[in-house]
Image (tube, grey):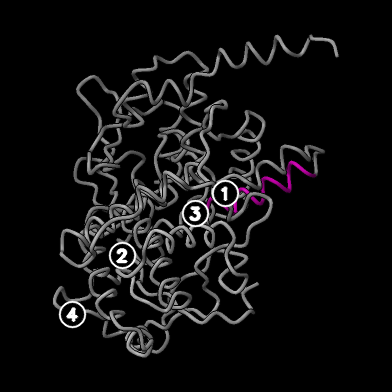
Amino acid sequence: MTHKSFPGMPLFDSAKFFNQIPRNAVFADQCPAVETFVLGLDIQGALDDYRYTKDFLTSYSKKSQDTYDKFRGDAERLLLWSWLIKRKSIVELRRRDLEEYTDFVAKPDPSWQADNTERRFLAVNGLREPNQRWRPFRVTGAGKGRLNTKSWQGLFSNLSVFFNYLMAEDYAPGNHIPIVKKNCPYLRQETGINTAKRLSELQWEYLLNTAIAMADADPQHERTLFVIATLKSLKLRISELAERPNWLPVMSHYHRDHEGNWWYRTYGKGSKERDVSISNEYLQFLKRYRENRGLPPLPSKDSSEPVIESRLRNRGIGSRQLRNIVEYAFTESCESLLNDGFEVEASELRAATTHWLRHTGASMEVAAGRELAHVQADLGHGSIRTTDELYVDSDNMERASSAKSQEV
């Protein structure tokens, strides 16, 4: 799909490079292609659109990489659609335009779609060049690229925040997003079972055993094993293990209290720090990984090494690299499942994302009888109701069990 001609290009780089742009500058010096593209659009207001959007993203880029990424994606797609298809500034968009945009999001033009997620920019001779394979949307099919109700809600929420910002800056005359959301035919009221997407016991067993076998065969995969064990056992979001502009997970974030209990301190959603409790079994994976790196078995209060070290010493790795590590292990586990005849389990695992490991850890702990309030505290949920709705599914399991014995 990426071979089709796309008339646009990515507009905003990753948070790391975006934050290097001087606050009083509009465009990045190391990416002249974006400036040439925007100024060459011949659309009145395009430069101001870009400037105000850049300022909007600046206000969120320091908060967290995930927050920046979600606002960047939705604002960038709307800008490109408004410029390239409607041929006008985003502040000239009216309700009917935005309703047309939701139709486009539901079914993008093929030239706007790519088979896979691609990097927006590539490093070429000291510059940041737009990646010719990047597209604003992913190809739909088999669930990929198609927005569910939660995704639509996120889209409308992000765009509403965006237009409210433009209004506060006296740039946009109004915010039509709430009325567009209200009438959106793609936003459905879901009343089905609300459970977290997670790995089954069998899938987790294969994934862990595959990661162990990979590490035993190649020391470079000791990192793979540790990432898998950490995301599941500590129930972390990917951003909580990654290096980002305002956070670098280091070994001293593992700490022991006066009773000998081990904890991991992380910086998560909502700019909140929290301590996650650690099991004795997980400590064995921590020791194995540290010994592989030539470190003492357990960290001390002044251990400054990154928790997940990149090839550059004393540097962590980003969310994309962590996802690549996990997805490689998923792929290898699928092969093992297929070889042993578990075709359905392998097919389901192919659809899994890194976030499923967080859900898997929480679900298994709740199923094992761990107190719900303790799981909630480890997850960082603000309300125990959230944890209960996602991970306590005993009523649904009983309903499913009672249905199996019914006759046709």
Would residue 335 be counted in the magenta stretch? yes
| Front tag of 2 and 1 | 2
Residue 206 in the image, given as x and y percentages of width and height: 66, 37
Snapshot quadrant of residue 399: top right
Identified by mark 1, the residue type is Ala
Task: Write the start and end of the magenta stretch as one range.
Answer: 325-338
> 103 left or right of 389?
right
The N terminus lies in quadrant = bottom right
**Residue that numbered label 2 is attached to:** 15
Element at badge 1?
helix
- For disc 3, the neighbor class at 10 Å (few under 14, some 14 to 19, many from 20) is some
Real-space Cα separation, disc 3 to disc 4, in angstroms: 32 Å
Real-space Cα separation, disc 3 to disc 1, in angstroms: 18 Å
Element at badge 4?
loop
**Residue that numbered label 4 is attached to:** 25
**Residue that numbered label 3 is attached to:** 323
Residue in view at x 52 percent, y 71 percent:
135
Element at badge 3?
helix
Identified by mark 3, the residue type is Arg
